[in-house]
Image (cartoon, rainbow, N blue to C red):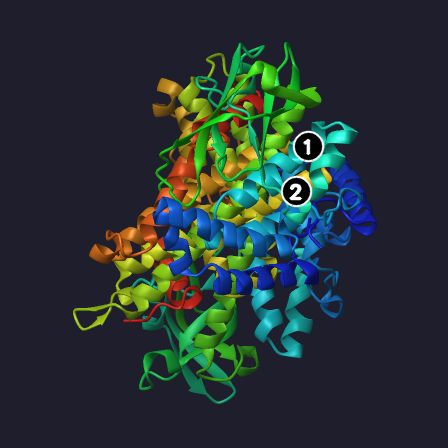
């Protein structure tokens, strides 16, 4: 086992960090607090990210992408999460692309993957249904007259919305939803849009098929990418907090010299390091041992959930009254943490899955 | 490059080790020092100890990768403990870092073979977390020092041949500047040892009293009054090595928890199952963090792992104890009779009390105290890793 980054991965990480510092500084991020402004800001960032090839990072070279692996993606998404970039990169370059690659017909791959990789189109994927939770077997066995997908990332910005529906038993069908109805959900995290999407069955155009296991593998890959963003967010909050407690003075000294503050900061670091390990491990499993993907994704998500929430909460506490204000950016991280925590399975869901795998239930 | 699987040479190393462990871990008496010494010697002679130690001093001259493989396989095979663990994890690595060539030639190999057992004499009754307050005096007497004082909480002191000792050589200097590191023969006239009984009932550690003990100056490690630095280097190595070896124990404890749960007549409820799964996630992440941070563990990052390990083990033991239900409040059958044992091997050894959740739970309370309390280590993390200001 070896978790040392390659020179290429270090370059990817550093260049992503420099790029986002330049192109997605806090004033840009804060434009997301206004719906219309946010769409414009997100679209501008999207074009620049696409130029770097990020949307096609995982797309095979034959399909016009960079053909890199999940570990590379995790390295990139950690930086993306540190800057709280909008969800379009995740929705298109990871979630929709992974579904197409795993389940799309050749024709569908040819039609969509190069365009996704180039950033010409933004795609997204609807999987879960009101009442299904994050458990694929709870999806409706066959869509009724109208298929409804909930918690669809960034549907308003998407040029193509894909649906994964159960087509009976363990089979699933991948389709394009033509002229769907989109209702934006008021997410606690305004930096990452979610929507409910409805599409009459006759306007679902099948472009692929697979099994529930393919569906779950697609979600597991997305989960690892999301977990990487979460750990990146946690690491950023830690950094902001360390800088703050070093400079903020009370009782004539920096508050970072008080043990009560120091020990909380130490705990933040411990959580970040464990979370990062979980993500790197899961990403390496995705690349090397796909048969273990589910367990590894659950490890990553459970660790990232804990790390991001705990670090974001503590970060606010250590910033005192300032941390509780709208002007300070920490609430954006806390809200991202809480919104991500319940995405693709909350902690209890993942622990139940691990317990089942260990033969405990 | 990030990878999970062994390279071909690593796979070969693992296969050889696994086969050897399969054939060689029987017939060892856990509470018998001689039996455990013999086991450690065989482990060394087969080439499995001192993996990262320099070859010229009896080590194997290999890398951390092999050490990690050893740890994984040792956990898997549930191997008995190495009796000279203080020598292997603390004194030896510290000697490699700061000892003279003569010291390394003289002392390292017998540490590996368990011919000479070591203990570490740092803490004193009035110098625990505040180690720089230590008062054990060493007075210059020509080519010797004359040492007088007391050390406490000393693991393996009852069976040790040598102690890795910090003493005060200059009482007038600022307190960090008057300390010196010595190697002291535990069989010297004037050394006496008393067992200290722990909350588990056994006496894994003890007190050492020095009454005008003569120590040759060639046994000084580093310069006179430079002992604080030696001590700090010892600590980072101690915490790094403890962290690494703790991965083995953590894996063993988790496997034990799984065995215990699976063999129980009462199935876990959903909440208990989640607790176990949560412990699985955290112990996996922690073990892998040791590997991920391996090249930084000789720095202050070792504190990160040590704090996390100690609390993780306490959590595992709590869960384990809770799986016993009402029986968790009883001593296990045939358990210790109240007589203080002088078990050399410490808490892993022995049947059946020392293998019980009751024992493990009680013993784990020491984890956040020994080798640096979690309070001290969190301060170290804050100040040395995160760079927060000191008071």
**Farthest-out residue, front:** A179
Q: Is residue A267 above or below residue B253?
A: below
**Disc 1 on helix, strand or loop?**
helix
Picture coordinates of residue A51, whole percent (x, y): 63, 56
Residue drawn at (61%, 20%) of the image = A204
Classify 10 Å Cα crowding around label 2: few (below 14), some (14-19), many (20 and above): many
Residue drawn at (53%, 10%) of the image = A145
Q: Is residue A105 above or below residue B159?
A: above
User: In the image, A252: left or right of A196?
Assistant: left
Q: Is residue A306 above or below residue B302?
A: above
Q: What chain does mark 2 sit on?
A: A
Would you say residue B372 is visible in this rendering? Answer: no
Residue A43 disc label: none
Q: Which of A331 and A259 lies nearest the eye of the viewer?
A: A331
Instruction: Give the mark, 1 or 2, whose residue is nearer the N terminus.
Output: 1
Q: Are marks 1 and 2 in contact (CB under 8 Å)?
A: yes
User: In the image, B67: left or right of A350?
Assistant: right
Picture coordinates of residue A45, whole percent (x, y): 52, 54
The quadrant holding residue B92 is bottom right
Which residue lies under the disc numbered 2? A116
Residue drawn at (18%, 73%) of the image = A252
* Marks 1 and 2, how far apart at CA: 10 Å
Q: Which of labels 1 and 2 is toward the front?
A: 2
Picture coordinates of residue A184, whole percent (x, y): 41, 32
Picture coordinates of residue B342, whole percent (x, y): 47, 45
Q: What chain does mark 1 sit on?
A: A
Would you say residue B341 is visible in this rendering? Answer: yes
The quadrant holding residue A17 is bottom right
Residue drawn at (54%, 46%) of the image = A228
**Disc 2 on helix, strand or loop?**
helix
Which residue lies under the disc numbered 1? A100
């Amino acid at each position: 086992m070896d978790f040392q980054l390659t020179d290429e991965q270090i370059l990817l990480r550093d260049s992503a960090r420099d790029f986002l510092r330049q192109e997605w500084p806090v004033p840009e991020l804060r434009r997301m607090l206004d719906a219309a402004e946010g769409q414009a800001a997100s679209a501008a960032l999207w074009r620049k990210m696409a130029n770097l090839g990020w949307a096609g990072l995982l797309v095979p070279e034959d399909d016009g992408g960079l053909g890199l692996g999940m570990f590379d993606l995790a390295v990139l998404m950690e930086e993306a999460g540190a800057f709280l970039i909008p969800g379009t990169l995740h929705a298109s370059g990871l979630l929709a692309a992974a579904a197409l690659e795993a389940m799309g017909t050749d024709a569908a791959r040819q039609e969509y993957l190069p365009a996704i990789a180039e950033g010409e189109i933004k795609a997204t994927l609807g999987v879960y249904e009101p009442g299904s939770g994050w458990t694929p077997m709870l999806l409706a066995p066959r869509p009724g007259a109208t298929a409804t997908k909930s918690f669809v990332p960034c549907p308003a910005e998407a040029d193509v919305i894909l649906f994964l529906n159960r087509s009976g038993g363990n089979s699933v069908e991948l389709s394009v939803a033509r002229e769907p109805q989109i209702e934006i959900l008021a997410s606690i995290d305004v930096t990452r849009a979610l929507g409910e999407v409805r599409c009459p069955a006759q306007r679902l155009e099948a472009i692929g098929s697979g099994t529930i296991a393919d569906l779950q593998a697609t979600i597991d890959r997305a989960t690892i990418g999301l977990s990487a963003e979460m750990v990146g967010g946690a690491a950023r909050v830690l950094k902001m907090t360390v800088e703050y407690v070093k400079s903020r003075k009370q009782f004539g000294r920096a508050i970072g010299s008080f043990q009560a503050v120091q020990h909380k900061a130490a705990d933040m670091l411990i959580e970040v390091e464990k979370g990062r390990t979980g993500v790197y491990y899961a990403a390496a499993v995705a690349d090397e041992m796909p048969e273990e993907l589910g367990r590894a994704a659950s490890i990553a998500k459970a660790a990232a959930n804990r790390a991001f929430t705990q670090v974001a909460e503590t970060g606010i506490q250590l910033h005192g009254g300032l941390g509780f204000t709208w002007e300070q950016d920490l609430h954006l991280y806390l809200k991202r943490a809480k919104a991500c925590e319940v995405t693709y399975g909350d902690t209890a869901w993942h622990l139940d899955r691990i317990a089942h795998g260990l033969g405990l239930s | 490059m990030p990878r999970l699987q062994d390279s071909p040479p690593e796979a070969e190393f693992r296969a050889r080790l696994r086969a050897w462990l399969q054939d060689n871990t029987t017939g060892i008496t856990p509470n018998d020092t001689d039996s455990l010494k013999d086991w450690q010697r065989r482990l060394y002679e087969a080439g499995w100890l001192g993996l990262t130690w320099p070859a010229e001093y009896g080590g194997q001259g290999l890398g951390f990768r092999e050490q990690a493989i050893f740890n994984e396989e040792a956990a898997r095979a549930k191997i008995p403990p190495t009796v000279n663990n203080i020598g292997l994890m603390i004194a030896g690595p510290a000697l490699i870092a700061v000892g003279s060539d003569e010291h390394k030639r003289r002392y390292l190999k017998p540490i590996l073979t368990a011919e000479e057992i070591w203990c570490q004499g740092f803490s004193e009754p009035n110098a625990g977390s505040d180690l720089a307050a230590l008062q054990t005096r060493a007075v210059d007497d020509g080519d010797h020092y004359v040492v007088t004082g007391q050390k406490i909480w000393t693991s393996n002191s009852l069976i040790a041949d040598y102690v890795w000792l910090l003493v005060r050589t200059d009482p007038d200097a600022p307190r960090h500047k008057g300390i010196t590191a010595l190697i002291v023969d535990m069989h010297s006239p004037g050394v006496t040892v008393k067992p200290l009984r722990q909350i588990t009932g056994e006496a894994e550690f003890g007190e050492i009293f020095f009454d005008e003990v003569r120590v040759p100056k060639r046994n000084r490690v580093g310069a006179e009054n430079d002992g604080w630095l030696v001590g700090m280097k010892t600590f980072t190595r101690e915490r790094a090595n403890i962290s690494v070896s703790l991965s083995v124990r953590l894996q063993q404890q988790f496997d034990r928890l799984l065995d215990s749960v699976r063999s129980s007549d009462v199935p876990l409820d959903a909440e208990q199952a989640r607790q176990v799964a949560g412990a699985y996630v955290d112990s996996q992440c922690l073990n892998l963090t040791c590997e991920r941070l391996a090249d930084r563990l000789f720095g202050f990052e070792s504190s990160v792992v040590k704090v996390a390990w100690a609390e993780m083990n306490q959590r595992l033991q709590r869960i384990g104890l809770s799986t016993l239900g009402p029986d968790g409040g009883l001593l296990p059958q045939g358990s210790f009779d109240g007589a203080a044992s002088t078990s050399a091997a410490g808490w892993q050894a022995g049947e059946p009390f020392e293998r019980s959740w009751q024992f493990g739970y009680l013993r784990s309370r020491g984890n956040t105290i020994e080798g640096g309390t979690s309070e001290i280590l969190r301060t170290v993390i804050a100040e040395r890793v995160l760079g927060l200001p000191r008071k």
